[in-house]
Amino acid sequence: MCRVTLRAADGTRIAGQLHPGPKGARIGFALAHGFTNHIRKPSVRRVLSRLAGHGAVLAVDLRGHGGSGGRTSVGPDEAMDVDAAVAHLRELGHERIVTLGFSLGGSVVLRQAALGTPPDAVVSVSSPARWFVRETPAMRRVHWLLEQPHGRLTARLLGVRLAGPWPEVPVSPIELAARIEVPQLIVHGTDDHYFPLADARALSEAGGGEFWPIEGMRHAESSTTPQLVDRIARWAADTVEPLDRGPATTPHGSAPTERTEA
């Protein structure tokens, strides 16, 4: 493992960790964490170390988190951070790149795949499908952090540096999913306490991707088991390899494949 420093398109300094993976690995994974997390959090590190058994992994602290500069926009600007990670993996010679994001990072990788330099496949775990979700107590707490003066101070104590309010509401993940031209995998826990399972199903349908409702899973990295990481990595390998036949694709508008995993 080695530390890397990247520059996003707007000049923001992005801190990352590069895990080289097995010798001869052709797949590179660019990983984006959830809100209030960073790449040194134990739950994130567990995912990184497991995923590194399948390929190279470049995990970045999204802006406003951890060792990166800037302030978090809670979605739109962070796509530039993932774009920088994808570009760096390609510069290192990795032939196929798969982006993997959790929660906030799940929405970010979808935005990057739709609007940035696309990867060869994208995996979004525990992502919102729409903005301003307030149906769950967990999301009402998040909105308090984002919208109230005392909440913003609390966010700073949690290690998150917030940018100002959105000047305009960005395109929602469910709208962006339909614009993505590479294979998509949407993973969501049946017991997710932030975002409804029905939203995740709608997100997968919008993009025509594969949908995995994970029985008993709650939210994001802290609920992602080693076995689930292995399944995601196998999906990535099956989707983007072998190289001589190119990446598999799922036509937009077709019904997504739904697979329930324990």
Image: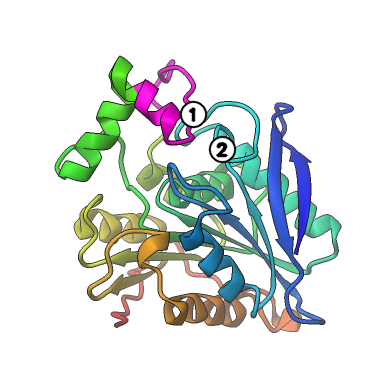
Residue at the far front: name it. 157
Write down the residue under mark 1: 73
Residue 12 location, quadrant = top right
Residue 255 colored magenta? no
First in residue order: circle 2 vs circle 1: 1
Q: Along the horizontal axis of the image, is 227 left or right of 145? A: right
Residue range in magenta is 152-169
Q: Residue at x 54, y 48 (%)?
A: 38
Q: Amino acid at mark 1?
A: Ser
Which image quadrant is residue 240 in? bottom right
The front one of 182 and 98 is 98
Quick check: is 159 in the magenta stretch? yes
Q: Are marks 2 and 1 in contact (CB under 8 Å)?
A: yes
**Disc 2 and disc 1: Cα gap in Å?**
7 Å
x and y, in percent, of residue 48 in the image: 58, 66
Residue 52, percent from left and from top: 65, 73
Residue at position x 42%, y 30% in the image: 157
The amino acid type, in three-letter code, at marker 2 is: Glu
The label on residue 78 is 2
Q: Quadrant of residue 59?
A: bottom right
Q: Main secondary structure of the magenta part?
A: loop
- The answer to whether 119 appears left or right of 94 in the picture is left
Vertical placement of 227 versus 15: above or below? below
